[in-house]
Structures are given as structure tokens and as C-alpha cells.
Amino acid sequence: MKEFVLASASPRRKELLTQIGIQFRACVSKKEEEILRNYPEDIVKDISYTKARDVFERGNRDTIVIGADTIVVFEEKVLGKPKDEEEAYRMIKMLQGNTHQVYTGVSIIWQQNNDTHVSSFVAMTEVELYYMNEGEIRSYIATKEPYDKAGGYAIQGYFARYVKQIKGDYNNVVGLPIGKLYQVLNSLNLLS
């Protein structure tokens, strides 16, 4: 069986992939994340492919590389990871009391019979948040949790207290839609 490689440094993605019983090693892509498209589905698909392709090309061809990228979208505005406290504040202030979308693109690259194959998909989850006052926003930012998360929050962390409801895959919001990923890998006969 081929070795799985996760093209990510995200501890959350590593944890999720482990949760479904896939043994893998992680290798971080060295490519910069560039947003070159307008539609969220295209953005995450392009970036996940770029990450997976970079790791695949630098590594052993006898691997199955999984790349992923997650963004938050509110009123057609793409929110990546906040760079500082003020950007985190602006993001959370914008999202609180509203519904937004979380998109994750996943790309799988492998080689079979000297041919390189790619399979990509996008998952979308809607998240509705409770209203937050100034003190709650500042207190959350003080946890330092927002800084490496798209949209400036971690649904699985302290921020869970502000999540009113979600429609779709919870794990997608964490960073990897593992149910869908497992089904795709299985349908491609990559798990045996």
C-alpha cells in the first residue's frame, strides 16, 4: 500500500486524519498561498492543489498526497488567517451575530502506472454565531487562539461558546472534512 502524506502543518488536520485511521506523515508545502480567483470554491481548490502538488513533486512518487485549504467567507468577503490583534478583532466583530460560510478544498495526488492522478473536492459549512460584546471579543483574542485560524476563530476551542448552530460538516470547519475525504479515498480504491 502506498504511503499517505498530509501536505500541512496544521495540528487539527493531523488529528482529524488520525481519527479516521489513516497512517500518514506530514510534509509542509513551501509554496505561498496566493488567492488568484474570485469564487471561494475555486480559491480553496487551487490552493489545496498547489500545496499537494508541491509536496508530491518534492517527494517520493509512491505516495498519496493530501492537500487542504480552508477559508471563511462573509458577505462575499474572503477571510484568511488574521495577521495581528486588530485584524482578528475586525474579523470576529464582523462575524459575530451573523451567519458565514466555511469552505475547505481538498486535493489528492497519486501516481498509478506512471500516470499522475488528481482528485479534488470542496466542502462548505454554514456557521451562525451568537452576538458578542466588546469584552467577549477582546477576551477571546487574548487566548491567542485566533492567529492561525481562517476567520480568526477555532470552533473546537474556546470559541465554541459563541457558535449558535452549524449546517454541514463540523470537521470541515475544523479544517478537514474527513467523512467526505474517507469516502473519496475509498471510491478511488486508495485505501486498500
Image (tube, rainbow, N blue to C red):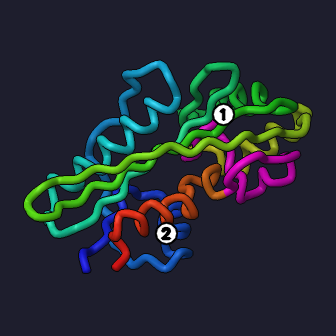
Q: Secondary structure at mark 1?
A: helix
- Please say if 82 is above or below 163: above
Judging depth in this view, the residue of 125 and 133 nearest the camera is 125
Identify the residue at horizontal 52%, vertical 29% (top origin).
Answer: 40
- What's the residue at 17%, 61% (across, down)? 111
From the viewer's perspective, tell me whether residue 58 is left or right of residue 192: left
- Which residue does the image show at 59% across and 29% down from the upper left? 79
Q: Is residue 12 magenta?
A: no
89 vs 190, nearest the viewer: 190
Where 118 falls versus 138 (above or below)?
below
Left-right relation of 186 to 57? right
The residue wearing badge 1 is: 88
Q: Quadrant of the N terminus?
A: bottom left
Estimate the x, y position of residue 9 in percent, counting from the top left: 41, 58
Can residue 144 be spotted in the picture?
no
Instruction: Work out whether 114 lies above or below 88.
Output: below
Residue for badge 2: 17
Residue extending furthest toward the left? 114
Q: In the rendered structure, which amino acid carries the disc numbered 2? A: Leu
Image position of 16 with respect to 98: above or below: below
Give the distance between the C-alpha atoms of the residues marked 2 and 1, in whole angstroms.
27 Å
- Residue 161 belongs to the span the image colors magenta: yes
The x and y percentages for residue 57 are 15, 52
| Residue 22 position within the rendered picture, expressed as x and y whole percent measured from the top left | 43, 76
Specify the segment rendered in magenta. 148-170
Task: Please provide percent x and percent y for residue 33.
Answer: 37, 35
| Label 2 vs 1, first from the N-terminus | 2
